[in-house]
Image (cartoon, rainbow, N blue to C red):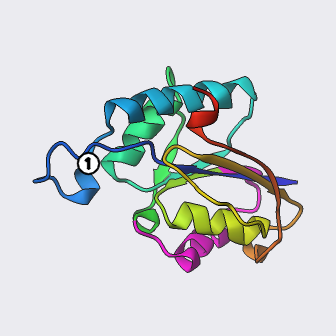
Amino acid sequence: MRSIYFLRHAKSSWDDFALKDFDRPLSTRGIQDADLMGNFFRSKKIKIDLILSSPSKRTTETLNHFFQPERPNIQFEESIYHASLEEVLTVIFGIPEDIKTVMLVGHNPSMHEITEFLGNKFINKYPTCCLAALTTNLNWNKFSRGCASLDFIKKPSELR
């Protein structure tokens, strides 16, 4: 059995319009939501074998708060930043077969699209810091539409 989690970065700040999109930090609410969702995730006692993340400032800060006090080892993948559905699938296809549990941390619309695609379920909204969990018996390189079961989708607003 393989498990994959898709985490959209927490809410970013738009206070400094001079910053490039890549360099935008989290807002105060984003920090609170990342802490909240991290607490929820830790309560599930899930062991992640591999985290693949966009290297943007807001995804990095989301991970820092989500996984406090200790941040696990993370591989930053440039291709996840502004990724298309196909680019996210390419990242998944490259996961080593001995890895059983993975988290991808990225942006919309790709986190929304990949969750709907793999779970073959319509998701009305995939807000910032939303976390989806899917499971399948397939190898990573065999992932395709509807290949996984959507175990849960959790939004920060459901925990506030």
User: Which residue is pictured at 41% across the width and 47% down the height?
Assistant: 59
User: How far from the left and from the top, in percent, is residue 23?
Assistant: 24, 51
Q: Which of 27 and 114 is in front in this view?
A: 27
Q: Which amino acid does label 1 sit on?
A: Arg
Q: Is residue 96 magenta?
A: yes
Q: Does the magenta stretch include residue 87?
A: yes
Left or right of 120, for residue 25: left
Q: Nearer the viewer, residue 99 or 143?
A: 143
User: How far from the left and from the top, in percent, is residue 17?
Assistant: 14, 52
Left or right of 150, for residue 106: left
> Residue extending furthest left?
18
The answer to which image quadrant residue 120 occupies is: bottom right
The answer to which image quadrant residue 159 occupies is: top right
Q: Can residue 140 be seen in this view?
A: no
The answer to which image quadrant residue 31 occupies is: top left
Residue bounds of the magenta highlight:
82-102
User: How far from the left and from the top, in percent, is residue 14?
Assistant: 23, 47
**Image quadrant containing the C terminus:** top right
User: Which residue is pictured at 73% across the width and 53% down the height?
Assistant: 99
Above or below for 35 versus 151: above
Left or right of 149, for residue 46: left
